[in-house]
Image: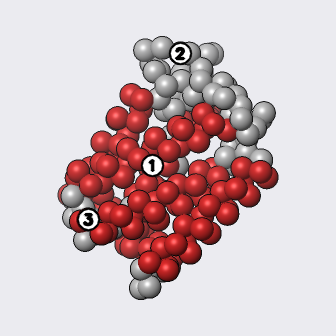
Amino acid sequence: MYIEHLIYSAALAIIIGMAFLRYTGRDQSWIIIFASIVPDIDYLFKIGCEFFSPLPSPTFMHGDFHAIPGLIFFSFFIALFFSNAGIKFKHALFFSVVGYSSHLIEDFIVHPPYFNRYLYPFDTTLYGTKILSDVPDLVIANSGTLLIGVMVLCAAIIVRTRIEPGWSVKKYVGNGVTACQKSIKRLMEGNE
Ligand SMILES: [Zn+2]
């Protein structure tokens, strides 16, 4: 459910960003959207390991990063990455934790206990409620989940544009893209 993760986390980010701007004068809440897609890279690791590893059993499984240790590890690195763009580490860490957690909670609500292993690698118990979907599909979980997400996202955009007349989706996404480019540039400069 990549698409749903993007949609739900975008709605969450837009609303949290509005409050954050009011209290700190800044809004880097688009980090929530970025962090929300990170847990599923365990699937890419799984494919990569199956392709390159000489070992018969898979060394990585989808769900290995759907865990609290993964949340701590990756949130720290996402925050470190965006601190290269001049964003305060603690702010970036807050948004990373919110984004990564939102992914784990969404998977818990939508899917059966197929891959969420919240305590991996310490415990391999699977978690999930199967409230919205029977089949864990990577791209779209189901039309109901998607439809609810689109409605929630539209509501978040309407609320924010009403409360903050200067705010636009284009500017918001643009700020995120610029910070990503800046962070990558700083990283490259640092490695030279
Ligand atoms: Zn997932």
For the residues labelled 1 and 3, the Cα–Cα distance comes to 19 Å
- Disc 1 residue crowd, few under 14, some 14–19, many 20+, Cα 10 Å: many
The residue that label 1 is drawn on is 99
Could you tell whether 126 is left or right of 183 in the image? right
Kind of residue indicated by mark 3: Tyr
Q: Is residue 155 above or below residue 136?
A: below
- Percent coordinates x, y for residue 189 in the rendering: 23, 63
Foreground: disc 2 or disc 1: 1
Q: Is mark 2 within 8 Å of ligand 1?
A: no
Kind of residue indicated by mark 2: Thr
Between 36 and 19, which is closer to the camera in this rendering?
A: 19
At 47% from the left and 65% from the top, the residue drawn is: 14
The quarter of the image holding the C terminus is bottom left
At 56% from the left and 15% from the top, the residue drawn is: 125
- Percent coordinates x, y for residue 17 in the rendering: 39, 64
Kind of residue indicated by mark 1: Gly
- Disc 2 residue crowd, few under 14, some 14–19, many 20+, Cα 10 Å: some
The residue that label 2 is drawn on is 124
The residue that label 3 is drawn on is 23
Res 5 seen here: yes
Could you say whether the residue bearing mark 3 is in a helix, strand or loop? helix
